[in-house]
Amino acid sequence: MDPQYSIWERIVNLIPMIRDELWAALYDHIPVWSIVITDSIITIGFIVSVIFTLVIGLIWLERRLLAWFQLRPGPNRNGPFGLLQPVADAIKFLFKEVIEVRYGQRWLLWLSPILLFFSVFMAFAVIPIGWGSENAPWGSKGALADLDIGVLYLVAIGSVGVVGVLVGGWGSRNKWSLLGSMRAVAQMVSYEIPMVLSVVGVILIVGSMNIGEIVGKQGLPFIFLQPLGFFLYFISAIAELNRTPMDQVEAESELTTGYFTEYSGMWFATFFLAEYINAFVVSCITATVFLGGWKPWPFPDNWLPGGIILLIKAIMVFAFIIWMRATLPRIRIDQIMAFAWKFLIPIALINVFVTAGEVLIWDAIWPDGEIFPYWFAAINIPLSIALVVVWSKLFFKLGGGRVDVRSLWSGYSQRDAVNSKASFST
Amino acid sequence: MELKTQPFVINMGPHHPSTHGVYRLRVVLDGEVVVDLEPIYGYLHRGIEKLAEARTYTQNIPFTDRIEYRVSMSNNFAYVLAIEKLLGIQVPERAEYIRVIFAELMRISGHLTAVGFLGNELGAMMTPLLYMFREREKILDFTDMVCGQRLTHNYIRVGGVSQDVPNEFLPAVKKFIKEMPHYIDEYDQLLKENEIVLARTKGVGVLSYDMAINYSCSGPMLRGSGVKWDIRRADPYSIYDRFDFDIPIGEVGDIYDRYRVRIEEMRQSVRILEQAIKQLPEGAVCTRVPSLIRPPRGEAYAHIEANTGEQGFYLVSDGSIAPYRFRVRPPSLINLTVLRELCIGWKIADLVVILGSIDINLAEVDR
């Protein structure tokens, strides 16, 4: 498929072209490693600043949308339509004192937001925003890093955030934070599995883990070919994000704010920002893998710049997440775990097997694989609806029972109980 | 190998988003499971019962506003009924009707906050609460119309009410009554069959029929467990014997039943309001009572069915201008005593929801 550059892409190409020319001119005069490092730093700075600007918009969007869902005006004082409210908040956070827990573990406390930030920013490296070629803006496949294991990379980088959550809660030396961390590890690790399995269907159809290729192959967005995959990915991603209805890790009404209870000032804001950026990352991945990425389906390609198409799609997914947040209550932790292991994972496995079978048939009938497999949609859409309905009616019931605490008590010695009482008395 | 774990003692409150004020629970957890629980009361104790002994009967009415501040007028009502019992005076018809109208409006208002905060504790990000506050706001506007106050009303007085309702009040209430069933349907759309709400509330925190009676629970807690006991029927005070209404009861006694009872009671309150507005007579709104009330020696107990349960006032008079003993029966404190039984064996997330379903108000619990 030969890319036809539109006027948009020529404009977007301008900066990287200048960059390429500049480095070519300097190539003979300074060492290569310094070029590589400077180039990386400039690119990272560019990405970070773009994303921070976007996130300010997203925070505003979330607050306004949530307010409209809840019959209130939302922030509307600072700047036009209250757009500068996140800026005002950031300034306030910057001027607040950072209060550290006296017996907290300082290193872990500081490591936690850094790890979280790292994990969310790294994910942007592989998200393609348009066609590429050798001298195109984002490398050969339109992404910053054109990794052949892009999907695997995304999942792996996403799980680094779990460590951040864990050490933040552990280092705080607060029991509520610890409870939040315990939940975080249980929940986020469990939900990695359906998340990976849900993307496997797409990987099977495309035959590659390269995200640029996944987008390129989407003649029809994969949500139609892999509706179950989309559904499972979206739910698991929400659980990974700790968004309502699976915001167990924060759970304001239960654990105050979970693992970052003890953070204040800008460190708190860091968690807040990381959460939004993470939500945006997930929206981007959903839009890229399942909704056609930068392709403006059903319109012809290059109708608008790919980045803008992706942004529109990502914001639509993000708005859906906000809608869920405004509507749904929270599921209990054991129910969340049961939901992952008894509902999502079996269904994801069935989906993988069905898709693999379809791909086998596809390969057998059309060995060159040039024809887009529209017929997958005809099978998978009814199948997924039937599967979800049948599984939820027959095999899985949300809800749990009371635990017999006498068996738990038997584990405690009398001394433990006495000690706990003594240490607690005021 | 036997795995040994240590009990995990956690201090819930007094500063916790879900304790409805400054309430402290010392919770022993095994992982997430509540193994033991010890409530610690008294962070909001203001000594109202003792303070009231040094003030005249009329001066005490504002104190009652501050007991269950969401439904101040219900408290006024119960207290004033006790004084009227001591004095043995009759209240004008119109005043009786106005009292009933406000008692029912207060019940709706109280149940709205209860259900809204229950949604909040389920983790619904304020949405049910804010929808319910939309209607509560209208009720507060009504109280603003009649007495100029939104929270601490001091409207129901000995012998009647402090002043007649203004002209714009009745049309506004009629409009509210007309709209309210539609709004209740709206809450049902959001919560009634929500899978997550069902999973979190059905079968959780079950208070059995016998246990509810043994712990002397009252109000929606008692009726949620299937006991058909409503003081408006069992011991009709004021003019409640003239109205036609049902007493909704639950079947299992879980959180869901309590929530349903509250929603159904709102519908019944609207029914009572409809009848009361239709029958509202003209006339005086207050009998003449001396400015310094000196009830004869004796004692009186008056109770009403408030939104949380049996709100009672027990007064002992020694013939002076101040009560010798001023005792409040706080329904939410007595309902709260059952908390430990309900919570043990459930997760900490359920503890929060069970506490919410009891619908406590710390100002009333600690007084």
Image: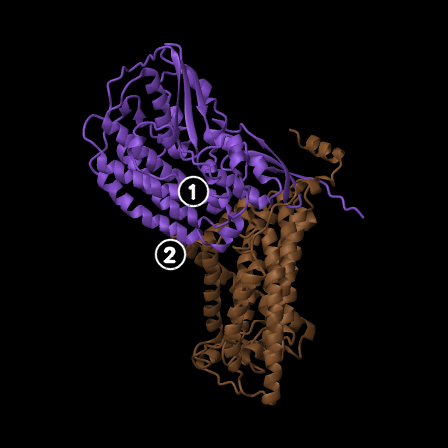
Chain colours: A brown, B purple
For label 1, the residue is B261
Percent position of residue A28, x then y: 67, 80
Task: Say which residue appears at 58% left-offset and 36% top-offset.
Answer: B341
User: Are the residues under marks 1 and 2 on the same chain?
Assistant: no
Label 1 resides on the chain identified as B
Label 2 resides on the chain identified as A
User: What count of labels does the image hold?
Assistant: 2
Tell me: B306 left or right of B166.
right
Amino acid under label 2? Phe
Answer yes or no: is residue B17 visible: no
Q: Residues within 10 Å of mark 1 (few under 14, many from 20)?
A: many
Relative to residue A340, is residue B307 depicted above or below?
Answer: above
Residue extending farthest to the left is B282
Answer yes or no: is residue A245 visible: yes
For label 2, the residue is A81
Tell me: B134 left or right of A365.
left
Front: mark 1 or 2: 1
Quadrant of the image for the C terminus of chain A?
A: top right
Percent position of residue A200, x then y: 62, 73
Nearest the eye: B212 or A239: B212
